[in-house]
Image (cartoon, rainbow, N blue to C red):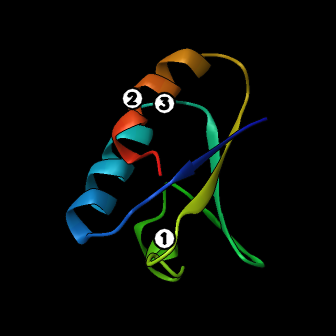
Amino acid sequence: MHTLTIKLDSIDRVKEFVRIITAFDNDFDLRSGRYTVDAKSILGIFSLDLSKPIELDVYGKENLDEVIEALKPFEA
C-alpha cells in the first residue's frame, strides 16, 4: 500500500479525480479522520470533509508510478 495526501477542494476536481483513478485497476481508499470511503465513489467522496487534505491509499504495486504521476495535480 502507498499513501498520498491529496486536496479535493471543488466539485470539478472531485469529478476529474474520479475520472482519472477509474482508469486504473488498483483499489483506492480515501481517509478523512475516522472515515474511509472507496475513492472511486463520487458520493462517498462528498461524504468526507473536503475542506482539509485527505489521505489516499493506493493498493497494489502494479502501475504505481503511473498512478502517482496522474495524481500529481491533486497533491496537497
Residue ranking furthest to the front? 76
Does any portion of residue 22 appear in the rendered image? Answer: no
Q: Are marks 2 and 3 in contact (CB under 8 Å)?
A: yes
- Number of numbered discs: 3
Q: Is residue 72 above or below residue 28?
A: above
Task: Kindly identify the amino acid type of the residue bearing the numbered disc 2.
Answer: Ala
Using residue 3 as the reference point, say whether residue 67 is left or right of it.
left
Q: Residue at x 36, y 50 (%)?
A: 17
At label 3, counting other C-alpha atoms closer than 10 Å, the crowd grade (few under 14, some 14-19, many 20 or more) is: some
Task: Kindly identify the amino acid type of the residue bearing the numbered disc 1.
Answer: Ile
Q: Give the quadrant of residue 71.
A: top left
Query: Where residue 75 sits: x, y (%)?
Result: 45, 45
Q: Is residue 38 above or below residue 3?
A: below
Instruction: Give me the disc on residue 24.
Output: 3
Label 2 element class: helix
- Residue, disc 2: 70
Q: Nearer the viewer, residue 12 or 51?
A: 51
Query: Where residue 35 sits: x, y (%)?
Result: 71, 77
Task: Kindly identify the amino acid type of the residue bearing the numbered disc 3.
Answer: Phe
Closer mark to the observer between disc 2 and disc 3? 2
Q: Nearer the viewer, residue 61 or 32?
A: 32
Label 3 element class: loop
At label 2, counting other C-alpha atoms closer than 10 Å, the crowd grade (few under 14, some 14-19, many 20 or more) is: few
Query: Where residue 76 sits: x, y (%)?
Result: 47, 52
- Residue, disc 1: 45
Label 1 element class: helix
Q: Residue at x 33, y 69 (%)?
A: 9
How far apart in space, not on screen, are marks 1 and 3 (Cα)? 18 Å
How far apart in space, not on screen, are marks 1 and 2 (Cα)? 18 Å
Using residue 41 as the reference point, say whether residue 61 is left or right of it.
right
Q: Is residue 70 above or below residue 36?
A: above
